[in-house]
Image (tube, coloured by chain):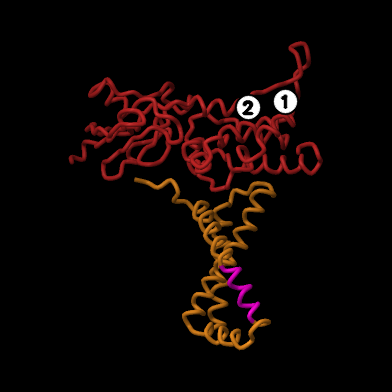
């Protein structure tokens, strides 16, 4: 194969399907998303995939690239192509819709199950809450809020493969940011939602999510924090 | 193809599982042999002399490494889950691995 071409094998179909191979011209600073877009626009318009921002903000373009979940818009071909070969699959642990598109409904429903939405008790007539950026709890919360919901951690997590009801690293990380948000009033209701085998106590601390998070977040650290808060609440008799 | 499992904390997880299973399998044998000392002392003596062979010492060294790996790996997990998060998780894996190998070496050198 010429050095000027990349050999790209892409999963075509849903749960049943097969790989189809394309030859794509190699360009300088080319991302994996550039390669997929080239194939869809120049070689095969029937190829389905997702993207929006192209700059690592929206979290919609994650795929399995040569076996690992990655955000494709910020993944350079030169870093991941092994011998000029790219193999692209949809994300693991989510139902396949078509080609590189997966159904992320369960993934996002789990954010809701983990009480991942903010609930305050102030109205627009109340004064703004003053929280210093140096406040320890605010720092913990800030460390996790940059999640873009790409699903790379979820697709990597072994616990989800063993227990499909497990909430997963992204939803638990979200819950941990809210546990540390002083303005939020969900409190024990959230802790009850994220405790148990389907929640933080199911995590085996393998840290695959930490390895694969494109934003370098630390879901295992967040889950460890939830474990500590759960145990504290149980010892205080607030949670049974 | 890259393997998503090829990182230190996953290997530590596998080691913890395997050593746990090996120790669970060893414990009944251990208790049975200790029981021999009470029930049949000559059988116990026979077993002890049999266990003094180099092959058995080598296998025992493996057992000591597994025991040490399970102990240090367990302490590592407790620290990970009950203390504030440390960013040097890979170093903790390396430390528990190093301690286990040293424990095995000390045992083996004393045994030979």
Q: Residue at x 76, y 38 (%)?
A: A240
Vertically, is A31 above or below A67?
above
Quarter of the figure with the N terminus of chain A: top left
Q: Nearer the viewer, residue A21 or A142?
A: A21
Q: Residue at x 57, y 77 (%)?
A: B106
Find residue A46 and report its horizontal and vertical position in percent.
Answer: 28, 21
Find residue A199 and report its horizontal and vertical position in percent.
Answer: 62, 37
Per the rendered image, the range of residues in magenta is B26-36
Vertically, is B76 above or below A21?
below
* Inter-mark Cα distance, 1 to 2: 11 Å
Q: Is residue A55 magenta?
A: no
Residue placed furthest toward the left: A1
Going from N to C along the chain, the mark reached first, 1 or 2, is 2
> Is disc 1 in contact with disc 2, using a CB cutoff of under 8 Å?
no
- Secondary structure of the residue carrying numbered label 2: loop
Q: Which residue is mark 1?
A: A184
Residue placed furthest toward the right: A236
* A25 left or right, relative to A154: left
Find residue A239 and report its horizontal and vertical position in percent.
Answer: 76, 37
Q: Is residue B35 magenta?
A: yes
Q: Subunit of mark 2?
A: A
| Chain whose colour in the figure is orange | B
Find residue B64 and report its horizontal and vertical position in percent.
Answer: 57, 71
Closest to the camera, between mark 1 and mark 2, is 2
Q: Colour of chain A?
A: red
Q: Which residue is mark 2?
A: A116
- Secondary structure of the residue carrying numbered label 1: loop
Q: Subunit of mark 1?
A: A
Residue placed furthest toward the top: A125
């Amino acid at each position: 194969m010429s050095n000027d071409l990349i050999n790209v094998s892409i999963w075509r179909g849903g749960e049943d399907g097969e790989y189809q191979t394309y030859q794509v011209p190699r360009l300088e600073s080319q991302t994996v998303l550039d390669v997929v877009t080239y194939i869809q626009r120049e070689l095969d318009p029937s190829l389905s995939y997702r993207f929006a921002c192209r700059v690592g903000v929206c979290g919609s373009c994650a795929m399995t690239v040569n076996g690992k979940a990655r955000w494709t818009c910020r993944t350079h071909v030169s870093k991941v192509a092994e011998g000029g070969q790219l193999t692209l699959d949809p994300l693991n642990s989510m139902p396949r819709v078509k080609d590189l598109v997966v159904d992320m409904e369960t993934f996002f429903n789990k954010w809701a199950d983990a009480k991942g939405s903010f609930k305050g008790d102030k109205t627009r007539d109340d004064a703004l809450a003053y929280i210093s950026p140096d406040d320890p709890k605010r720092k913990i919360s800030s460390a996790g809020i940059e999640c873009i919901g790409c699903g790379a951690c979820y697709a990597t997590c072994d616990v989800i493969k063993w227990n499909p009801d497990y909430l997963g690293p992204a939803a638990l990380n979200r819950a941990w940011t809210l546990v540390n948000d002083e303005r939020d009033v969900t409190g024990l209701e959230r802790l009850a939602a994220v405790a148990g085998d389907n929640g933080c106590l199911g995590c085996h601390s393998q840290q695959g999510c930490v390895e694969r998070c494109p934003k370098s977040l630390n879901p295992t650290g967040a889950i460890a924090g939830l474990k500590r808060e759960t145990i504290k609440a149980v010892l205080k008799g607030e949670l049974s | 193809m890259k393997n998503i499992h090829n990182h230190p904390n996953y290997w530590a997880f596998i080691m913890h599982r395997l050593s746990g299973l090996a120790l669970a399998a060893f414990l009944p044998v251990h208790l049975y042999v200790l029981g021999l000392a009470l029930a049949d002392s000559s059988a116990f003596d026979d077993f002890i002399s049999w266990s003094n062979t180099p092959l058995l010492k080598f296998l025992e060294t493996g057992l000591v490494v597994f025991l040490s790996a399970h102990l240090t790996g367990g302490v590592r997990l407790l620290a990970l889950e009950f203390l504030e998060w440390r960013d040097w998780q890979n170093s903790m894996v390396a430390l528990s691995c190093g301690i286990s190998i040293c424990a095995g070496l000390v045992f083996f050198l004393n045994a030979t």
